Image (spheres, rainbow, N blue to C red):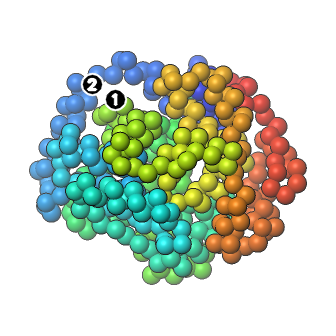
Amino acid sequence: MRYCVNCLNVSTRPNIVFTDNGLCYPCANYKAEPDIDWDERAEKLAEIVAFAKANNQSGYDCIVGVSGGKDSTRQALHIRERFGLNPLLVSMNYPPQQVSQRGVDNLSNLIEQGFDCINISCAPRTWKKAMRYAFISYGNWAKATEFALFASVPRVAVAYQIPLIWWGESAAASLGDMGVLGSHASDGNRLKYSNTLGGGDTSWLMAAGLDAKDILQYAYPTDEEMERANIKIVFMDYFMKDFTSFANGNYAALRGLSIREAQPNLDPDYFGTSMLDEDFININMHVRYLKFGFGRTSDIVNLEIRSGRMTREEGISLVKRFDHAYDPSLVQKFARYIDVDLDEFWKIVDRYVNGELFERAGRGHYRPKFAVGVGT
Ligand SMILES: [Zn+2]
């Protein structure tokens, strides 16, 4: 595993590339920022806004997928107030057993600012079955739910004939997932080619024992359907100087977002502002850490280093302290939710632990063999 020379992004991240001088793609992008021609981007934005207005057939100019979290709160308000567009919000809701009260409150807070929102709920039992299968078969329960989440917005766009979909940030520019890179840095039409969605084929869910009729909401529109409907997906961060986790968190908190009390020894999001609508994602992030050697603290620290608010050394010490953290009581809750016992849970996790990066030191304990930040 090698590290970016600037931040703590790792070569084990799926689909990542490094430049010849050792920078990860997001850092290389960031370093090029002083050269960005913002006037040119403003012109491109004006074209996109004009496209949405010219092709508006339903009264809604565009769609934004929202959870009510910091990024979607900022997006919805910015689109309406700065871009002058009339957005329809679409929210894919977690089932009642999974959604947090905070998530419900935050979505309420967002729509109370005067938005129409379509809420989509998938059948909870199918949802859980798909999650269980994805966790056992891929070590990634969210693989199942992300299909539904990512498909929901373009499905509504096709159904309502809404020409434009805004997505917050490009996974290529922010994380280094190059699978989604389109013809232009703001072009999100390849979104379904991300590492998780891999083109949007849902046939793997049939292997979970689900029928085609159970997983209709998990199917992303085909490329032909998207083309026929003339839908553009655009990454907003390309047009905004400060679309960052930190700025969005402040912006949304000032407009009523409820955040969680940071408990970095149990939850490596030491700001407490991300992934507020449910808690099981922490399980996923912990397994991701054991698979690839980077956890949520790494994600946050990389953004902080890139923006100049933190040195690489400070980042290393935070990653060492918190990246491996998880809440044992949450593991218990999750295991109960997907109906496995704790021994089974850790046996499943064992299968995904990267033996080159970690050695097993008892049930649920893994010792890293790598030194954080060393080796570029
Ligand atoms: Zn980097």
Which residue type carries mark 2? Trp
Please name which of the two marks, 2 or 1, marks the residue nearer to the observer.
1
Q: Which residue is mark 2?
A: 38
Q: In the rendered image of this protein, does residue 132 appear above or below residue 198? A: below
Asked whether the residues under the numbered discs 2 and 1 touch, taking CB atoms below 8 Å apart as contact, a structural biologist would say: yes
Residue at 25%, 54% (x, y): give it. 113
Q: Position of residue 40 (x, y in %)?
A: 23, 26
Q: Which residue is mark 1?
A: 241
Residue at 80%, 55% (x, y): give it. 364
Q: In the rendered image of this protein, does residue 81 appear above or below residue 318? A: below
Label 2: state its secondary structure: helix
Please name whichever residue, 162 or 200, is drawn nearer the observer in this view of the structure: 162
Q: In the rendered image of this protein, does residue 181 appear above or below residue 64? A: above
Q: Is tag 2's residue or tag 1's residue first in the polypeptide sequence?
A: 2
Residue at 47%, 78% (x, y): give it. 123
Q: Position of residue 89 (x, y in %)?
A: 29, 58
Which residue type carries mark 1? Lys
